[in-house]
């Protein structure tokens, strides 16, 4: 029977801990972390929020990062379309169909949809982004690296949500709330953002009634 030394076992456990805990000081951008969502929630730092100095213009968004003629907004619309739209000059979208998971509504016109920052820009600012560079905030506002970060939803549901967190707003479509809370934790983990005590209590209450889904997150910072 093969045996391993205590030193080797300890090293293996240490490596596993780095993989499973985004809160570790050894975590680096590009690293993948995998853990049950309730553990991910528990790993997020908890502190009061501070919106001092916030301005939406500090998060430059809807850029064309890959210079293919389509803005971040249109990239999300193309990716999330149930029926693919036609792309015209300047990435103008015609036709197509979309489903808004927040309110379980369907649409056949791109202009009827907003692209929601699942964790709003103001919430990001409150939770740590106030200390970031302008380029980091731009990357956050245009995050196409994780499909959970930006989501096409009805304009009505997006504007109802505004800058609120799960303590004061949850999707009208009740069956989507587990996914919403899980994705919220995943985005905050990806960007190493904090949560406030009331937000944590709300997320805990939601997730306690949900499957303890394993989430996989590639750290952005």
Image: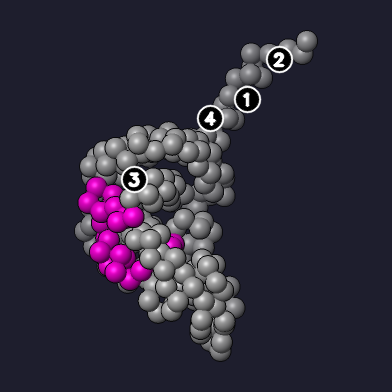
What's the residue at 50%, 53% (across, down)? 220
Depth check: 83 or 7 in front? 83
- Which secondary structure lies at badge 3? loop
What residue is pinned by disc 3? 194
- Magenta region: 150-173
**Mark 3 or 2, nearer chain start:** 2
Residue 86 screen position, x and y as percent: 57, 82
What's the residue at 39%, 38% (across, down)? 210
Find the residue positioned furthest to the top.
Answer: 1
**Mark 1 or 3, nearer chain start:** 1
Residue 171 screen position, x and y as percent: 32, 55
What residue is pinned by disc 4? 17
Q: Is residue 25 visible?
A: no
What residue is pinned by disc 2? 4
Q: Is residue 165 magenta?
A: yes
205 lies left or right of 220: left
The residue carrying pointer 3 sits among few (fewer than 14), some (14 to 19) or many (20 or more) residues within 10 Å by Cα, namely: many
Find the residue positioned furthest to the right.
Answer: 1
What residue is pinned by disc 1? 12
What's the residue at 28%, 49% (across, down)? 166
Q: CA distance from mark 4 to mark 3?
A: 20 Å
Q: CA distance from mark 1 to mark 2?
A: 10 Å
């Amino acid at each position: 029977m093969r045996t391993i030394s205590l030193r080797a076992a300890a090293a293996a456990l240490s490596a596993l801990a780095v993989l499973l805990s985004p809160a570790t000081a050894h975590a680096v951008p590009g690293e993948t972390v995998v853990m049950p969502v309730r553990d991910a929630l528990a790993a997020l730092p908890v502190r009061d929020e501070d919106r001092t100095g916030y301005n939406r213009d500090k998060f430059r968004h809807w850029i064309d990062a890959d210079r293919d003629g389509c803005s971040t907004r249109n990239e999300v619309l193309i990716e999330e379309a149930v029926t693919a739209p036609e792309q015209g000059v300047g990435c103008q979208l015609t036709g197509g169909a979309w489903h808004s998971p927040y309110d379980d509504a369907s649409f056949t016109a791109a202009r009827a949809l907003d692209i929601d920052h699942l964790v709003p820009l103001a919430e990001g600012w409150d939770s740590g982004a106030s200390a970031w560079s302008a380029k980091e905030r731009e990357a956050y506002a245009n995050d196409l690296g994780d499909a959970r970060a930006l989501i096409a939803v009805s304009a009505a549901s997006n504007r109802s949500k505004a800058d609120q967190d799960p303590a004061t707003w949850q999707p009208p479509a009740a069956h989507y709330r587990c996914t919403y809370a899980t994705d919220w934790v995943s985005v905050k983990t990806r960007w190493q953002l904090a949560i406030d005590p009331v937000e944590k209590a709300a997320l805990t209450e939601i997730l306690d009634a949900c499957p303890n889904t394993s989430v996989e997150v590639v750290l952005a910072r």
